[in-house]
């Protein structure tokens, strides 16, 4: 498990890799292709960013990073809940907060971000309970209701439906209006969301074991904590993925 099991997550690592062209973990036949030049370059870049961070960052969780940003000790952080914490912990000046997509490498056609599918699991065997749950979720996702749900404490959750992104019940909230420009950027960038192991239209079940063990983040730890080169760590990372897939 990575030393920083919160901040060094597969999500943040993959955001860097995807923007460097390392979007595919598998080839079209389901063979692992994690060990490739684009992946190595992505980890090398991440390692450079890590050296520009406070020296104790490898032990941080999400909260420490947000506090560092709010106190102006960090100029930039790769996190999704920055707006809410910035408004409550910092001076809350919307004109002083910038939000931008992670830059992509030359030759890449678009900025990429990490995205996870959101779903509802109804586990009850009682048909009446399942029907009631379905009715409730349908009600919740109606645009006039959905925005109120998104803006509940702690607030500023991003909509996951196209209708929700247009709902007046979302945009009429005072805090959302205050940071409208930043939120519009986040929503626009979400259209380029990717999820490692699910980017080619083919799904290979072994990705579950790879993701569950946080191997992308473990590979980064081997560089910034273990002292390995990016090439060595990526080679070991593919070996770990192979082992986890068996």
Image (cartoon, rainbow, N blue to C red):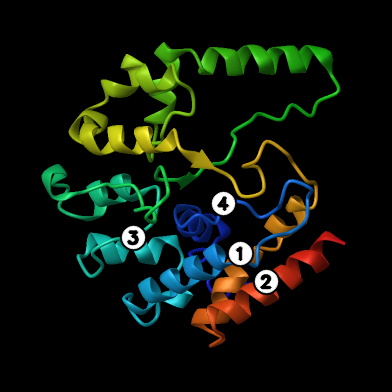
Q: CA distance from mark 2 to mark 1?
A: 7 Å
Which of the two labelled residues, at mark 2 and mark 4, occupies the earlier sequence position?
4
- Say which element carries label 4: loop
- Please give the residue where the numbered disc 2 appears in the rendered image: 237
- Say which element carries label 1: helix
Q: Are marks 2 and 1 in contact (CB under 8 Å)?
A: yes
The residue under the point 38% across, 38% down is 189
Residue 97 visible in image:
yes
The residue under the point 62% across, 73% down is 234
Given residues 145 and 185, the one toward you in this image is: 185
Give the quarter of the image for residue 46.
bottom left
Which of the two labelled residues, at mark 2 and mark 1, occupies the earlier sequence position?
1
Q: Of tags 1 and 3, which is closer to the observer?
A: 1
Return the mark for residue 77: 3
- Say which element carries label 3: loop
Q: Are marks 4 and 1 in contact (CB under 8 Å)?
A: no
Point out residue 159 in the picture as x, y percentages from the top left corner: 43, 28
Point out residue 238 in the picture as x, y percentages from the top left corner: 71, 68
Return the mark for residue 216: 1
Which of the two labelled residues, at mark 1 and mark 3, occupies the earlier sequence position?
3
Q: Quadrant of the C terminus?
A: bottom right
Which of the two labelled residues, at mark 3 and mark 2, occupies the earlier sequence position?
3
């Amino acid at each position: 498990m990575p030393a920083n099991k919160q901040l060094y997550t597969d999500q943040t690592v993959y955001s860097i890799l995807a923007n460097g062209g390392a979007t595919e973990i598998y080839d079209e036949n389901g063979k692992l292709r994690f060990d490739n030049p684009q992946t190595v370059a992505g980890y090398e870049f991440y390692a450079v960013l890590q050296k520009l961070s406070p020296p104790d960052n490898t032990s941080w969780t999400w909260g420490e990073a947000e506090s560092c940003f709010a106190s102006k000790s960090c100029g930039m952080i790769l996190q999704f809940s920055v707006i809410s914490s910035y408004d409550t912990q910092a001076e809350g000046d919307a004109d002083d907060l910038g939000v931008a997509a992670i830059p992509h490498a030359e030759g890449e056609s678009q900025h990429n971000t990490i995205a996870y599918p959101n779903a509802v699991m109804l586990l009850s065997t009682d048909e009446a309970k399942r029907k009631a749950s379905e009715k409730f979720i349908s009600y919740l996702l109606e645009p006039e209701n959905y925005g109120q749900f998104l803006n509940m404490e702690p607030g500023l959750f991003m909509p996951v439906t196209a209708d929700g992104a247009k709902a007046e019940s979302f945009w009429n909230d005072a805090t959302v209006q205050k940071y409208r420009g930043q939120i519009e950027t986040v929503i626009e960038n979400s259209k380029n969301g990717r999820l490692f192991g699910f980017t080619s239209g083919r799904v290979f079940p072994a990705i579950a074991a790879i993701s569950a063990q946080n191997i992308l983040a473990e590979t980064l730890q081997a560089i910034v904590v273990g002292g390995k080169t990016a090439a060595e760590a990526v080679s070991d990372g593919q070996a770990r993925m192979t082992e986890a897939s068996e």
